[in-house]
Image (cartoon, grey):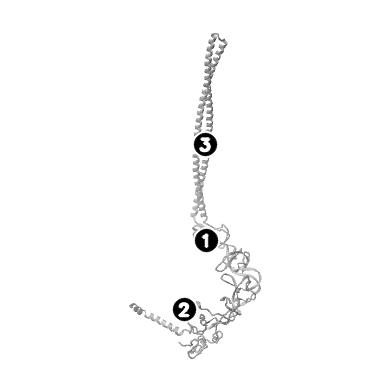
Amino acid sequence: MKTVIRFVRHHWLTLGLLLGSLYLVMWIVETQRTPGAMTIIEAQAMDMTAMKAPPGVHPVAAEHPVTMSVSAESSFPAEVFAFSDESVAVRIPGRIKRTLVYPGDRVVPGQLLAEIEADEFAAMSGESTWMARAGSSMALAMQREVESMRASLARSRAGLSASGAAVERARAGARSAQTRHSQARRELEAAEQAILDARASLKYSEAEVGRARRLHEAGAISLDERQMAEREFESSVAKTRAAQAEREARFEAARSMEAEVEAAQAAVKEASETQHIAKAEVDEAAARLKKTEQEARAKEAEREALKSTAASASTLSQYRYLRALSHGVVSERAASPGAVVMPGEPVFQIRAIDTVRVQSELPQTLASQVSAGTRVLITTGSTTREATVTSVFPVVSADSRTFRVEALVPNKDHSLLPGMYATLSLLGGPEDALSVRNSAIQYDADGNAFVWVMGEAESSGEATDWTCTMHPEVSEPGPGICPKCKMDLVPRKGTGDHVAEARKVRLGAQGKTHTAIASGLAETDQVIWAGIPGLFPGAPVRAMEWGENGPKELPAAAGVPEGHDHSASEASKVSVDDVPEGVYYCPMHPEVQSADPGTCPKCKMDLVQKGGE
């Protein structure tokens, strides 16, 4: 409580001013408020969305469609674009060393535009180039080593093949020696058998010689028989000696063949050992070749890597030079010599304008009438050029319900510059058809064309409801008093003999002033061409004479009771300023005046005194 008292003591003047202001406002509201006006609380509680103007008659201008020849010539805003845009940007960080072109200069593909100072990339390129050359030399040396290893392997394989042939020859010699040795053994055995036979024959002959000698000495046989026996003995001795000699010869031959077999077997063994050595040499040469080939492949891969690195370094080094990619004209230079630039930063803009693109947005209703090859006029200032549509973009914007068309226009003199405003006019031959004014053509939310026509009104003439002329939002089913201003309610009726009807149409050729209607209208229809804003299906309309600034006169308002038509009453001739001081009057009907307080006989409002508080 002490705090409140202390606050009041310190701010008594401010609080007094606030209370005085509040009292003054309340006094002004209670004494100076116009009769019938809403209070602040009423105004705050008022629903503006529920307030509707009383239905009246829309003044419109209407006429019947006429049959006339319409030349399709519709104009639409357009914009000029370059045939192609090229942004020349840097790819490596550095400082611009020099520029060779300026905006307005023509350039050709490959032309040098600017040079970037980046010595580290040039040094990197040189180092990578030398490393690539060294890698190539090493790879070449390894390739030669591989060739040498392959030749050595071929020689080893040839030696292995020769040793294999030698082994086969030695084995063949051994087999031949073995065969001859076997033959010699058989012959030796035959010779020994011959010795045995010869010895047996010798023994027999010796016995026969002894017997023959005895018989001869005994005279039993003749000398010839004795000598014959002796000759047979001598022959047996000779045969025995010959058999012994043959046996010795065969024995020596067998020994010789045995030595030859041993020699052949030794040769086979030696050839086999040589073959094993040759095979080992082949395996070793193959292993060395495989290892050398692996090293050669590694060196080749290293060479390719160094070569790729050198190519990348060379490419990066070439990025120091900014060159044009196509024909065009320099339209912008974003950096000057000495400026430090970073990768991706554009330096030049090049536009090809020998041929330009003129693009325009057309309403979707023309989609069926425009195609590639449609003749158009391109107007910029006082210059008009004829061209043809070269591209129709196959997309309609959901926001504007338009589609884009493009025409390529030759521009050798460079009079058309990108960004220029132009007008694109569609050209077509004359077409005789029912036509209406261009202002009569309307489009719904889906982009479909329609026109407003005057239809017959179906009104019974009975009141729809009762309302207050001062507060049209008040609606009652029958007579009564306005709860806000206490005025008598009046019947609200629709007036007018015609109502607005939306009629969908299919458009034909569109000229400067009229548009041909392909279907949807008859010659007897009255088409509304002015006064269209605010129309809705069923809205009462009345055809009025139309001037440059709108209707020359307005139809009578709807729902105004007798005595409340301010347009025709004497109230339009008497104003509040005409009321004498001190006289009581009606704010709504200043012609109602009285020397004493009372109510207005017309609107039942309280009379107010002019100049009174």
**Which badge, 2 or 1, is on the more N-terminal residue?**
2
Give the residue at x 40% y 80%: 18
Residue lying farthest to the bottom in this orientation: 595
- Residue 568 spot, x, y in % from top left: 56, 85
**Which quarter of the rendering shows the C terminus?**
bottom left
Distance from the alpha carbon under mark 2 to that under mark 1: 64 Å
Which amino acid type is marked by label 3?
Leu
Which amino acid type is marked by label 1?
Val
Question: Disc 1 designates what residue?
Answer: 347
In the figure, residue 392 lies in which quadrant? bottom right
Question: Disc 2 designates what residue?
Answer: 45
Q: Which of pointers 2 and 1 indicates the residue nearer the eye?
A: 2
Specify whether 114 is left or right of 72: left
- Label 2 element class: helix
- Label 1 element class: strand
Question: Disc 3 designates what residue?
Answer: 160
Above or below residue 590? Residue 153 is above
- Label 3 element class: helix
**Which quarter of the rendering shows the N terminus?**
bottom left
Above or below residue 308? Residue 400 is below
**Which badge, 1 or 3, is on the more N-terminal residue?**
3
